[in-house]
Amino acid sequence: MGTHYCHLKLDERRKLAKWLEAKMPISEIADRLGRDPSTIYRDIKRNRYTDKEIPELDGYHALVAQDKYEARRAIHRKMIVYPELKEAIEDRLKAGWSPEQIAGRMRLERHPIRVSHETIYRFAYSKDGRDEQFYRHLPEHRRRRRPRGYRRHNRTHIFDTQSLSYRPESISERAEFGHWECDLMMFRKEHGKVNVTSLVERVSRYAVVMRNEDRQSKPIMEALIQGLAPLPADARQSITFDRGTEFSAWRHLKAGIGADAWFCDPQSPYQKGTVENTNNRLRKYLPRSTDPTALTNRYLRSICHRLNSTPRKCLDYRTPAEVFETKLMEIQNRLE
């Protein structure tokens, strides 16, 4: 397994240039900088300045080396080289798409210029991206990226067999109706613990929202059971959650309505992108400043009706309600 190579920073390049001019051995420079000698040799080779007309100027100069390094990185940072690409990505992020979804869609549509989700994250947390506050468009809105290998404490209530890696392909590919995604929408702390459950069926994009008085898992699961129980069994086969403790009582689903539970990988909300996108649409009507204690079931139903009655491109401009109703009729016909 290869090691991660970390490039020199400007202050290190200044020290390197000064010590090279003083004829200090590379091994000693590397030791002082806390770097491997190969890193020093590599940086000198890549960023050395040469002038064919005035050879006396040849050498390693800190600012020149930094400029060459930045210019070389810019070639690979397509979002800087192609502003129209950055603008298109920004529009998708504002619409609630995750970097993973954007990159995946580009591959699907065979864009001549496309980026990986990692490139989007790297730009967002680069100096250029921070200057533009590009991170604000990311789903998590963090100013700084969490370090590699970061993990919250282990959620021991999730079995490995409930991981998405074990979820059938027919669910992942939206080939089968009756599989849902679930999340909680939170509001400002001064409004207390009241929150809203958002629930979306993956094939039809049909949305349901419910108010919760707090984040205790068992009442949340009981509300899900009560909300889905009127549907035929084939319309409520499974629900995908993230690994929040509010979903730790997932076993009640199987006992209550026979529904399986699946869980995203840690820190991977994009794996339930359908409900994440729906949450972004819901925020138009339920911003974080909303007082959730004032929300009525009637108002929540009116929001759902509006979303479910809006044509979607991914549904060939049918509405979620139309697709959902068609699928329910297909189930009913099979049962007759």
Image (tube, helix red, strand yellow):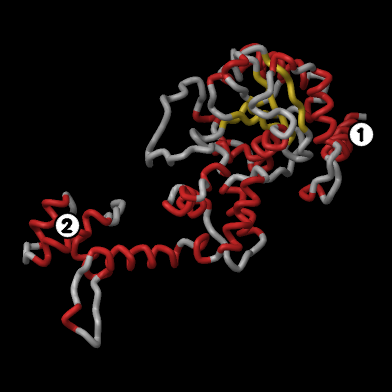
Amino acid found under the numbered disc labelled 1 = Asn
Badge 1 marks a residue whose secondary structure is: helix
Is 169 in front, or is 10? 10
Q: Which class describes the residues within 10 Å of circle 1: few (<14), some (14-19), or many (20+)?
A: few
Badge 2 marks a residue whose secondary structure is: helix
- In the rendered view, tell whether residue 126 sits above or below residue 231: below
Residue at position x 58%, y 54% in the image:
103
- In the rendered view, tell whether residue 247 sits above or below residue 141: above
Which of the numbered marks, if any, corresponds to residue 333? 1
Of the numbered discs 2 and 1, the one sitting upstream in the chain is 2
| Circle 2 or circle 1, nearest the eye | 2
Give the labeled residue for mark 2.
Answer: 15
Residue at position x 59%, y 13% in the image:
216
Residue at position x 18%, y 53% in the image:
35
Q: Which quarter of the image is occupied by the C terminus?
A: top right
Q: CA distance from mark 2 to mark 1?
A: 77 Å
Q: Which class describes the residues within 10 Å of circle 2: few (<14), some (14-19), or many (20+)?
A: some
The image quarter in which residue 318 lies:
top right
Is 11 in front, or is 149? 11
Task: Give the image location of residue 184, x and y in percent.
Answer: 63, 25
- Asked if marks 2 and 1 touch (Cβ < 8 Å), the reply is no
Is residue 217 among the parts visible in the rendering? no
Task: Give the image location of residue 178, x and y in percent.
Answer: 75, 33
Residue at position x 7%, y 62% in the image:
25
